[in-house]
């Protein structure tokens, strides 16, 4: 990751899922996509499997209406995830949050399997 | 076609990639996560020769990758889902591609073991963790318990003592298995308390971990310990799903090999924590990788493939 002067930093995770770098981008993605899954994490052993599962889901036709996004847990753009009431009791990275029409409707902590992501998309975003 | 495909990007894999590349073998390393494997969850790597100054496992992992690439190895991020190893030319299928190769070095490493308690899985990220570096910061000025008594448990305790107000080490024996150097550090630390001869019996909490019940294995006395989180460090299990029923494994699931890293299948070599051996450390993984690379090169020459 490359640090910028203003405290933001460019994500440089080696993944194909779109990565959010600023608050403005976060707002834009939520406005453009009525269903979105955002994973806030680091480049750690519990986070990467979630990114990888998201990469796979993104390629599947049935999820073409869902935006899969990743945000670095340590940048300002991740604040809204970090401080979300649904994440208050979370103590394990990554935080994965589900947005329906811009509203945070579900959140999970720590590693999630592809199946768990699919189940949550089916339950909360359909 | 590749001369060698290395599955796994920990110290064993990168060492193998470095030696293969320097031997002018057409080398591909496939890692499904970030470089480093288990090493990347180590805050400070203190027991690798030459590293007198503190360096994290993650930093050295990226340096190892850079070094292997510098000499011509290709490294990619992908999931190996199947290997076909019966014929002279081996096939490696990933989530994205199918590759042909003359040899394979298996270096998938190992992953942390779970205790097997009720609520353990449910409370992952809600008080149950397997990575102190990843999740330690969520426990600032709180009390935590570490389950285990080996090097990982002791290193985790030392790391967490800078963040947490109290650390219990729950250990089933009356002596620690970790290195004497780490034991000395632990004993000097007032925040760390070792609970001897004790196992965790139950995770307490409705929606998140609120404490644990522990049992003394000698007296069978059960008591509650109030902690906000537990860190599980009871060892690792080998990541051998990919080659189950394809190469010989021991009863614990580790790949059986000789001292030259040969498995029971010609052209398939092994390196690192995934291998049956006495000491699993970064240095032994790196040494395995170098040997596996050398023997793979000899195999290619001898078989004239």
Image: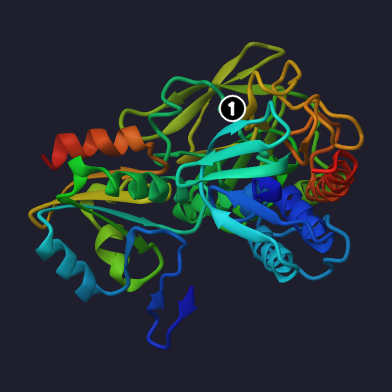
**Does B65 sit above or below residue B254?**
below
- Tell me which residue sits at (31%, 65%) in the image: A78
Residue B226 location (% of width, % of height): 48, 35
B293 with respect to A64 (left or right):
right
**Does A36 sit above or below residue B280?**
below
Q: Residues within 10 Å of mark 1 (few under 14, many from 20)?
A: few
Residue B208 location (% of width, % of height): 36, 35
Looking at the image, the residue that sits furthest to the front is: B304
Q: Chain of mark 1?
A: B
B299 with respect to B62 (left or right):
right
Looking at the image, the residue that sits furthest to the bottom is: A5
Helix, strand or loop status at disc 1 = helix
A59 with respect to A4 (left or right):
left
The residue carrying mark 1 is B241
Q: Is residue B157 visible?
A: no
Q: Quadrant of residue B66?
A: bottom right
| The C terminus of chain A - image quarter | top left
Closer-to-camera residue (B72/A105): B72
Closer-to-camera residue (B116/B228): B116
- Tell me which residue sits at (77%, 33%) in the image: B275
Closer-to-camera residue (A84/A19): A19
Residue B12 location (% of width, % of height): 75, 48
Residue B267 location (% of width, % of height): 78, 35
Q: Is residue B292 visible?
A: yes
């Amino acid at each position: 990751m490359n640090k910028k002067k203003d405290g933001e930093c460019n994500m440089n995770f080696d993944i194909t899922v779109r990565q959010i770098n600023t608050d403005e981008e976060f707002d834009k993605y939520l406005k453009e996509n009525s269903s979105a899954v955002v994973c806030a994490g680091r480049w750690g052993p519990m986070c990467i499997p979630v990114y990888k599962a998201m990469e796979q889901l993104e390629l599947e036709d049935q999820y073409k209406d869902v935006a899969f996004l990743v945000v670095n847990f340590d940048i300002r753009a991740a604040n809204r995830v970090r401080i979300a009431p649904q994440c208050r009791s979370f103590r394990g990275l990554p935080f994965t949050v589900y947005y329906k029409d811009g509203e945070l409707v579900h959140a999970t902590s720590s590693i999630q399997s592809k199946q768990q992501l699919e189940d949550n998309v089916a339950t909360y975003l359909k | 076609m590749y001369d060698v495909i290395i599955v796994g990007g920990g110290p064993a894999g990168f060492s193998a990639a470095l030696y293969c590349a320097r031997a002018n073998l057409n080398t591909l390393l496939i890692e499904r996560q970030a470089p480093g494997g288990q090493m990347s969850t180590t805050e400070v790597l203190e027991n690798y020769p030459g590293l007198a100054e503190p360096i994290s496992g993650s930093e050295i992992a990226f340096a190892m990758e850079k070094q292997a690439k510098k000499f011509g190895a290709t490294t990619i991020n992908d999931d190996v889902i199947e290997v076909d190893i019966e014929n002279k030319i081996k096939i490696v299928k990933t989530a994205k591609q199918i590759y042909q190769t003359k040899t394979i070095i298996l270096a998938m490493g190992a992953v942390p073991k779970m205790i097997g308690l009720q609520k353990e899985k449910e409370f992952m990220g809600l008080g149950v963790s397997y990575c102190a570096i990843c999740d330690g910061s969520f426990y600032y000025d709180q009390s935590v318990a570490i389950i285990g008594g080996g090097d990982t448990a002791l290193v985790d305790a030392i790391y967490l003592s800078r963040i947490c107000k109290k650390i219990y080490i729950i250990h089933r024996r009356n002596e620690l298995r970790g290195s004497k150097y780490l034991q000395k550090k632990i004993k000097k630390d007032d925040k760390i308390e070792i609970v001897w001869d004790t196992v965790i019996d139950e995770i307490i909490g409705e929606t998140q971990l609120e404490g644990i019940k522990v049992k003394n294995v000698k007296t069978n006395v059960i008591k509650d310990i109030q902690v906000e989180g537990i860190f599980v460090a009871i060892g690792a299990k080998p990541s051998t799903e990919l080659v189950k029923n394809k190469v010989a494994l021991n009863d614990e699931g580790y790949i059986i090999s000789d001292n030259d890293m040969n498995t029971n299948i010609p052209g398939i070599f092994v390196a690192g924590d995934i291998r049956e051996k006495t000491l699993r450390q970064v240095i032994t993984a790196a040494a395995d990788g170098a040997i596996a690379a050398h023997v793979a090169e000899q195999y290619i020459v001898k078989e004239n493939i």
